[in-house]
Image (tube, coloured by chain):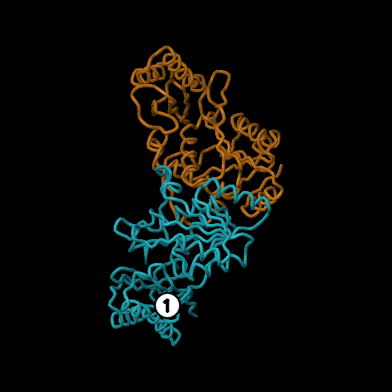
Chain colours: A cyan, B orange
Amino acid sequence: MKLVTDRTTISKIVKQHRQNHESIGFVPTMGYLHEGHLALVEKAKEQNDIVIMSIFVNPTQFGPNEDFDSYPRDLAHDQRLAEAAGVDYIFAPSVEEMYPNKMNNQITVVERAGVLCGRSRPGHFDGVVTILLKLFSLIMPERAYFGKKDAQQIAVIDGLVQDFFLPIQIIAVETNRELDGLAKSSRNVFLSDSERVEAKELYKSLTKAKTAINSGEKSKKRIIEMVIDHLQLNTSGEIDYVEIYSYPSLKALDVIEGKVIIAIAVKFSKARLIDNLILDVR
Amino acid sequence: MKLVTDRTTISKIVKQHRQNHESIGFVPTMGYLHEGHLALVEKAKEQNDIVIMSIFVNPTQFGPNEDFDSYPRDLAHDQRLAEAAGVDYIFAPSVEEMYPNKMNNQITVVERAGVLCGRSRPGHFDGVVTILLKLFSLIMPERAYFGKKDAQQIAVIDGLVQDFFLPIQIIAVETNRELDGLAKSSRNVFLSDSERVEAKELYKSLTKAKTAINSGEKSKKRIIEMVIDHLQLNTSGEIDYVEIYSYPSLKALDVIEGKVIIAIAVKFSKARLIDNLILDVR
């Protein structure tokens, strides 16, 4: 495995592989790898000749009071995990390498971004699509891999690919979970011991909602109340949102029908966790 | 020469040529071709294996009171000229083909767009970069060709390529002029006979400014006054702007020094004409 930190080198590598007609699978990450990321790599290896992983904590997708500075970083550890998983290249540029000049253009996500994390984190998805456009230009992958834990992110990226006819297939991979159901996330390290025990209740509240829906409950209002009650009773976290929308269009609905997402975000003392379930309700 | 009107077909064609390691030169146009466009094709043929020209009057770069509906169109004539010039493919999609859905993302040009045509035509360059990102994704050219008559457009596109690391070389081609100096433009057909005679004065006013600068005049204010005087005395048109900036950064300056652009726009009864000179002043 090769570690690359500059644009010129990664472009040359990509060009060479393209000339050899080798397909490129791309796994964009912010590093501090866990099994969730490695599941993306596994899928990318199945479907492509070459796997490139980017490790870049992108400043433009963090708000002024968010955790950009404290976001966990461990490149040496990441390199070992990525190499063991079969990644061919890690692209880990500096902030200056990805933002060498003041931007001349600004992208604003105007659909699918005004709800859920987009509402709690204004400008977050603008930063996500900005860095992805840059990375896609450099890596020119056939396929790019994202985890379903960030379901809204996948919907936004799907909108980006649609808008600009990007010649890239977006592959959504199932959320990787701990044995007790907690969705794997780099931010889980910030949970205290007692919060870690409570954190499993996020997924429990979602499966409870799923059971109720499968038993015939179609009222958005009642399902949301049920999830909120469960979280309040079983965790010390502050609920950021519990919402239900159509997916991937993320439009409002009253009756739970068709493809829907139940999404939650809970703030613990040092970590804000998100989780979701996507259901096809007939 | 082949005429293509849908995204799927042009993508297949592009993919085939890329697999054959053939380089693609791209000439984006709004059609109603004249020698200015053909000079772009000539350059593209020199430098690439394959030349693709797009013909698309892009609605998103026209303001609500601009000439989108009346912009001249003649695809049959364009096909004959393009074929004679050696274009390999014309891509002439419908508006629905390029904007199949409401856009999820909005691009705003925040640098280099607040002056000159960008000030007179708010949103114009936002539309230009939007359609170019779409076309670049479909055509995936090694090089794209633009005329220096649209000098601000070239500066804005240069900013787009910088921001997103687009793997495309932007080639700026000299403005093609009539014998009397009028810059060739599809909009020239809208000039009345007497306006056509006056229209040569745009370029004359620019060369007069150039002579004065070469003779030692460094005051922006005095050069602008000289150009305005010349245009008012010699044309019936309404001056939209006469401005001087650094190029390509388009920053304000008082003293004419370094690489600068003198740019003018004049409104005649049915046509708004632009022209410019870029000078390297030591």
Q: Picture coordinates of residue A197 (x, y %)? A: 35, 80
Left or right: B9, with A255 as reference point:
right
Q: Is residue B220 above or below residue B141?
A: above
Q: Residue at x 61, y 34 (%)?
A: B33
In the orientation shown, which residue stands out farthest toward the bottom? A215
Q: Do we see residue B165 in this rendering? A: yes
Tell me if I can see residue B128 in this picture: no
Q: Secondary structure at mark 1?
A: loop
Q: In the image, residue B208 lies at what x, y percent?
A: 45, 15
Judge from the rendering whether residue A204 lies leftward or rightward of residue A154; answer left or right: left
Q: Residue at x 54, y 20 (%)?
A: B181
Disc 1 marks which residue?
A256
Residue flagged by tag 1: what amino acid is it?
Ile
Residue under the image location 42 percent in, 69 percent down: A185
Position of the C terminus of chain B, as image quadrant, is top left
Q: Nearer the viewer, residue A212 or B78?
A: A212
If the image is split into quadrants, where does the N terminus of chain B sit? top right
In-front residue for pair B9/B59: B9
